[in-house]
Amino acid sequence: MPLTRDQIISRLQDVTDPELHRDIVSLNILRHVSLCDGYVRIRLEPRSPSKAARDQLAQGVDRAVRSLGDEVRDVTIEWQEPQGGEQGGPAEAGAQPSQGGQAASAGQAGQTGQAGQAGQEGPEGLPGVRHIIAIGAGKGGVGKSTVAVNMAVGLARRGRKVGLLDGDIYGPSLPTLLGLAGMRPQGHGRNMIEPFEVHGIRAMTLGQLVEAEKPLIWRGPMAHSAFRQLSMQTHWGELDYLIIDLPPGTGDVPLTMSQLLPLTGAVVVCTPQKVAQDDARRAVRMFAQLQIPVLGIVENMSYFIADDGKEYDIFGRGGAQVMAHEMGVPFLGTIPINMRLRANSDQGTPVSNFEDDAQLGKELEAVVQALQDQVAACDMEAAKPTLNVH
Ligand code: ADP
């Protein structure tokens, strides 16, 4: 029987807090448990600021989860700093001396109770949109937009309602990749705009709203408001998935996005070389910092198949997969270097990628399937009763 989140929570009832001598579930310090593809992520809000106590707690949690068997591929433990006095836990725990940055918790108790509540409600989101998935990359040119377009089209080919938002407000590439030249935006009501209906998806890009080739230079607050308008004032309608093509790197837009939209998760696109992996690691860490689950890593330009059918690992195929494994995040698959894919991207005909080249179509379908599996796994987790765990 596959491992479930309930099994993990029930096993965590056997873990005792080293200082309070009660199990961590009834102590109400377990803040989040998720399970995706055998990777378990646990967030704890420990009562004690002592490093030794936290280390001991982490060891106990790690050991307990791993004792569930080989299906547990990795365990990540995160700490959430105490939110003041709203927990209702044992009084003596809240009164323990704090150290360093944590000393603020007692003094802020009244406020943080409020702030914590509001924070838990999360960003306002988009009504009618079920899953919002961001596609990011540590740097430009690795094929992030190409992957975003092909994931969107691939999901639409499976009958899903899909939107694609060009969040790369500094250098929008959807006008080219989707062949939007000559299309004019249409308004919807007073302040909304209709997305472009192309290739079975609904797409929106700033590239069709401003002069082509005009450099788009945004200061932080302008970038925030450009992204906000583009995402919130597009009339998306009902969507199963909204895919967001982020700008490369770790700038303002991901932060704005995380504040505005409740994301299901993010995908990081990476090429196999070591230097590309270093950038991708930063992107993975950025999403973790923004509390956006990483659904997985896609290795693009993984290898090249020559006319004689021979495969060449130009950039060192498999590098991103090793990195994914090391970072404890799922690996969603590989996409080869393919001249047709490049030509279809330049011509804005992405559907051909799935129809004209059997090998390419197969690889793209596998990545779409892996992404859907990850979303389904996270859905399953979210649907479970919460036990004060979220
Ligand atoms: P990014 O969004 O990361 O900057 P793009 O998706 O715009 O990158 O891709 C950069 C260029 O590389 C584009 O010309 C695109 O067509 C090409 N490209 C991306 N992935 C592949 C691939 N697997 N095979 C061939 N060309 C690719």
Image (cartoon, rainbow, N blue to C red):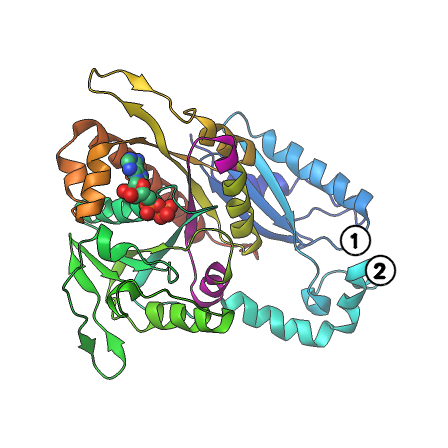
Question: Which residue has dot 2 on it?
Answer: 96
The picture quadrant where one finds residue 364 is top left
Q: Is residue 161 visible?
A: no
106 on left or right of 131: right
Q: Quadrant of residue 99?
A: bottom right
Residue at image location 51% in from the left, 51% down from the top: 287
At a point 46% along the width and 62% down the height, the residue shown is: 253
At label 1, the amino acid type is: Ser
Residue drawn at (39%, 41%) of the image: 142
- Mark 1 lies on a secondary structure that is loop
Q: Ligand 1 within 8 A of label 1's CB?
A: no
Task: Report how far apart the C-alphas of labels 1 and 2 lie in the structure.
Answer: 7 Å
Q: Along the horizontal axis of the image, is 59 left or right of 278?
A: right
Which one is earlier in the sequence, the residue at label 1 or at label 2?
A: 1
The residue pinned by badge 1 equals 48
**Is the residue marked by circle 1 packed among few (<14), some (14-19), or many (20+) residues within 10 Å?**
many
Q: Quadrant of residue 209?
A: bottom left
The residue lying toward the viewer, choosing from 384 and 44, is 44
Q: Is residue 307 above or below residue 323?
A: above
Q: Are marks 1 and 2 in contact (CB under 8 Å)?
A: yes
Q: Residue 40: image x %, image y %?
A: 54, 39
Q: Secondary structure at mark 2?
A: loop
Q: Which sits in the foreground, 95 or 133?
A: 133
Residue segment shown in magenta: 253-277
| Magenta stretch: includes residue 81 | no
Is residue 269 covered in magenta? yes
Front one among 365 and 210 = 210
Q: Quadrant of ligand 1?
A: top left
Q: Give the amino acid type for the residue marked by disc 2 in the picture.
A: Gln
Q: Position of residue 256 (x, y in %)?
A: 48, 65
